[in-house]
Amino acid sequence: MKIKSAVFDLSAPDLKSCPASALPEFAFIGRSNVGKSSLINMLSGQRELAKVSDMPGKTKLINFFLINDSWHLVDLPGYGYAKAAKADRNEFNKAVGDYLEKRRNVSCVFVLIDSRIPPQQIDLEFLDWLGDCSVPFVLVFTKTDKQSASASQQNIELFKKTMSESWDELPDTFISSSKTKAGRSEILGFIQQNLENQNRA
Ligand code: GDP
């Protein structure tokens, strides 16, 4: 998919403030500092579409970006500031919980996982919760330029293995680097395919 236009639409503090439009939405979420803003900028081809910040917990709003006048890229607040490990909805932003549970036009959620570290409980529990909401999702393993391909692969395999203890079917996975742009064409291709499937249905 070629990105012809990517513009900020609005920031929503809660579900009722989300855009009235029923355009397909592709949402991005992950632990704070996982590289979400960098990935959004890399995908959109705009250096400052989402603010890249080293300060965890800064983004608390749901940010909507209109892409190619045809779909919304949704930047969800990161999770993982809470001390407790159990990712029930109280531990991340209520707006995010409402959005994922109730928003009807979510086409897919991209859950970002740091490729440099072994499986984290908070990510696994978030995925369990997402599964309970019946929201379609895929995984993106970020920051793969920071280590060897085999080291990333090892963590990805371990993550999948851990997931398979509670899931019958594993989600699609992507690897990404906002530095080398690895994963860009694959992720955008996935979105394009998903949009085409919706148009055909
Ligand atoms: P967010 O909190 O999830 O939005 O994370 P950011 O996009 O703000 O990234 C957090 C930090 O990781 C920043 O210093 C980024 O420059 C760095 N970072 C993010 N993605 C990558 C990546 O793919 N490769 C490298 N080398 N650094 C990255």
Image (spheres, rainbow, N blue to C red):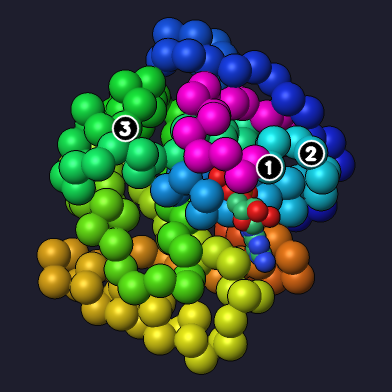
Specify start and end residues of the magenta stretch as a single range: 53-69
> Which residue is painted at 70% across and 29% down in the image?
66
Q: Which mark is residue 52?
A: 1
* Residue 82, position as x, y percentages in the image: 29, 37
Q: Name the amino acid type tagged 1.
A: Val
Q: Is residue 117 above or below residue 10?
A: below
Q: Are marks 1 and 2 in contact (CB under 8 Å)?
A: yes
* Residue 115, position as x, y percentages in the image: 48, 71
Q: Nearer the viewer, mark 1 or mark 2?
A: 1
Q: Which mark is residue 48?
A: 2
> Which residue is painted at 54% across and 11% down in the image?
20
**Crowdedness near tag 2: few (<14), some (14–19) or many (≥20) residues, C-alpha within 10 Å:** few
Q: Quadrant of the N terminus?
A: bottom right
* Residue 192, position as x, y percentages in the image: 65, 52
Q: Nearer the viewer, residue 24 or 78?
A: 78
* Residue 35, position as x, y percentages in the image: 58, 53
> Which residue is painted at 49% across and 9% down in the image?
17
Assign a secondary structure to mark 1: loop
Name the N-terminal-most of marks 3 and 1: 1
Image side of residue 96 versus residue 20, left or right: left
Q: Nearer the viewer, residue 122 or 11?
A: 122
Instruction: Using the rendered image of the protein, determine whether residue 35 is visible from the camera's viewpoint.
Output: yes
Q: Is residue 32 above or below residue 1?
A: above
Q: Which mark is residue 92?
A: 3
